[in-house]
Image (cartoon, rainbow, N blue to C red):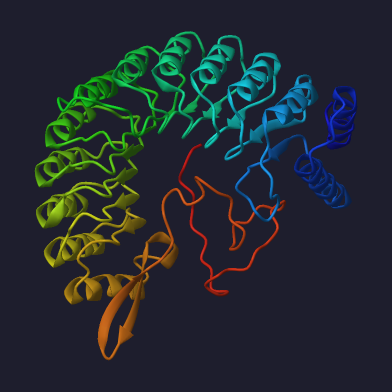
Amino acid sequence: MSDIHSTAYRYDAVCTELGVTPNPYVVKMLEKEKEETVLMKKNGEFKENMHLYLAGNNHLLTDKRLVDDDMIALYKTLQNNLYVTSIDLRFNNITDEGAKHIAKLIEESATLKDINLMGNDIGPEGGEALAKSLQTNQSLKSLRLTGNKIGNRSGMAFAQVLQVNNTLETLDVADCDLTIESIIALSTVLYQNKTLKALNINRPLLFTHQEETTVHYAKMLHVNTTLEEIHLQKYDMRDFGATRLAENLMQNNSLKYLDLSCNRVTRDGALELAKVLKENTAIEILDLGYNRLEDDGACHIAEALSTYNTNLKTLVVSYNNIGNKGLCALADALKVNTSLEQIFIWGNKLEEPATIAFANLLESGRIKSEDTDIRAYIVDGVTKLCELNNTIRRHYYYVPSYGDDVPSWQPRGQNPRGSDVVAIKNFTTY
């Protein structure tokens, strides 16, 4: 099966064989793919593969979520399929039983490269089955399990499989109830693993305030030469942990995306991270949102940007209790720094000196409206800023239905805020 027509025919045959009614959502997406293929053929183009989008949180496409029985049909349809190379199954009602069928598909498939299972009901058994399937798979590059409570047992299974798997490049196990054992095990494996490029391990269940997990990842980053993206949100990280990370990142030349948002880093931690920026390391995206940087911390970051750093392209300091002093320092740094493209500051103390400074940056074109989360306006001669719905991972949880970046298969919905829509670059590597 190397085209959409044979794939759709196989799905109908499988449903007949199982004695079940074809799922309307699956049929709809296969029909949309047929229509797109016909249009491309008329233009002299040929489509070699397909992204099968079956997310359960898209009300424009479906009002029912997929269940375990649907996974049986998908497994039998795709087990020898060469056309479908990625599947999006986020926010459905898939449990351990459904995950086991997906695991069988991963074991037998030679072409699947990306599977998104975010926001389902997969538990420890299903998570362990998915991990074990990676022992033999030689094609899958990205697996996303965000929000599935697979627990410590599955976390240990993923740590074990990363010792032998040499194809997986992206692993997302955020909000999966991993505990300290599996978190540390994953960091230990990455001393030797040379293929994983992106790791999301946000919000583990930690019952310690000693920051052992942060120290382990700091030491790993000192020697790892392949990891390009790491997310460490909600680690209860303080200045001690941020300092250990900074010390070990000084010589790291591979990490491009460092996410430390939703922690407890203050000005002292920001000072140490600013030293990393002064070393002009490979970091291009630094997310420090929802911390406690305040004015002094913002000034430390601004100093690094205005003097030594030429690599950072995106900075997030939203909700950090930063006032006029810190925000004006960042605005002044942007006048000197020409490499920073995106900055997100909403949620701080946006008083008039700071609002004027950023309004001038927007008016001059130094910051584009699609590269920030603010927009300037004037009321009774006073400059104000309002919030824009722009983030660095805008489409992490959903697919857009309006704007300039709507996929061809997605029905267009109505923009609730009018027709003036600005699309923003999506920096996530998932």
356 over 33 or under it: above or below: below
Q: Position of residue 294 (x, y in %)?
A: 14, 55
Residue placed most toward the observer, 366 or 268: 268
166 over 342 or under it: above or below: above
Residue placed most toward the observer, 388 or 130: 130
Question: Which residue is drawn at the image coordinates 34% and 34% (left, top)?
Answer: 203
Instruction: Decide if residue 311 is in sight here.
Output: no
Question: Seen from this angle, which residue lies furthest bottom?
Answer: 380
Question: Which residue is drawn at the image coordinates 36% and 18% (left, top)?
Answer: 186
Q: Tell me which corner region of the image, top left, top right, bottom left or bottom right, holds residue 74.
A: top right
395 over 383 or under it: above or below: above
Q: Position of residue 121 (x, y in %)?
A: 54, 31
Residue 174 horizontal side relative to residue 316, left or right: right
Q: Position of residue 183 (x, y in %)?
A: 33, 21
Instruction: Decide if residue 338 is in sight here.
Output: yes
Residue 389 horizontal side relative to residue 88, left or right: left
Question: Which residue is drawn at the image coordinates 70% and 58% (left, top)?
Answer: 411
Question: Which residue is drawn at the image coordinates 51% and 12% (left, top)?
Answer: 165
Residue placed most toward the observer, 89 or 408: 89
Q: Position of residue 173 (x, y in %)?
A: 44, 28
Q: Tell me which corner region of the image, top left, top right, bottom left or bottom right, holds residue 12.
A: top right
Residue 169 horizontal side relative to residue 36, left or right: left
Q: Tell me which corner region of the image, top left, top right, bottom left or bottom right, holds residue 327.
A: bottom left
